[in-house]
Amino acid sequence: MGSKKKEKDEKKEKPLENWTIKELREEALKIPNVQGVHGMNKQEIMEALRIEKGLPALEKKTTATIRQNKEKAKALMAKRDEERGAGASRTRLNILRKKISKIKKKTRLG
């Protein structure tokens, strides 16, 4: 019996982003001035809970756009080709290849 209470206390301590949608809904249903909880998505419920509890809003991370990522990938490909022509080591070329691959994955949707 004690372990369930401990689990519940741990859920309260973890940040809202780590809560499941079910946990967020249960908490939001306890708030009297929030309506339509079951029609809300996770972000909307978290925002309502933040406002109710007086928590600060999360700062959005700035990420590079697809166009910027493609430009970075092109620049790295040019650098790779230049270093390949200069006789760079295989490990250096592999590092560049992996960086290019990682950036190209960010340009894909889904």
Image (spheres, helix red, strand yellow):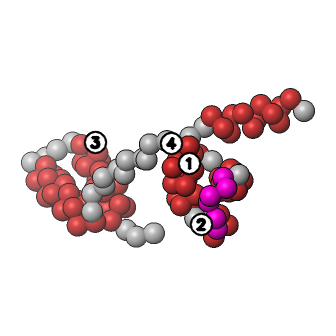
Highlighted magenta segment, given as a residue range = 31-36
Give the camera-side residue of 56 and 80. Answer: 56
Q: Which residue is mark 4?
A: 54
Q: Position of residue 27 (x, y in %)?
A: 68, 50
Distance from disc 4 to disc 2, alpha carbons, whole Å, reads 20 Å
Q: Nearer the viewer, mark 4 or mark 2?
A: 4
Q: Position of residue 17 (x, y in %)?
A: 55, 48
Crowd band around label 2 with a 10 angstrom C-alpha radius: few (<14), some (14–19), many (20+): some
Amino acid type at circle 1 is: Glu
Crowd band around label 3 with a 10 angstrom C-alpha radius: few (<14), some (14–19), many (20+): few
Crowd band around label 4 with a 10 angstrom C-alpha radius: few (<14), some (14–19), many (20+): few
Distance from disc 2 to disc 1, alpha carbons, whole Å, reads 16 Å
Amino acid type at circle 4 is: Gly
Q: Which residue is mark 3?
A: 91
Amino acid type at circle 3 is: Thr
Residue placed at 71% from the left, 52% from the top?
Answer: 30
Q: Are marks 4 and 1 in contact (CB under 8 Å)?
A: yes
- The disc placed on residue 40 is 2
Q: Position of residue 57 (x, y in %)?
A: 43, 47
Residue placed at 51% from the left, 54% from the top?
Answer: 47
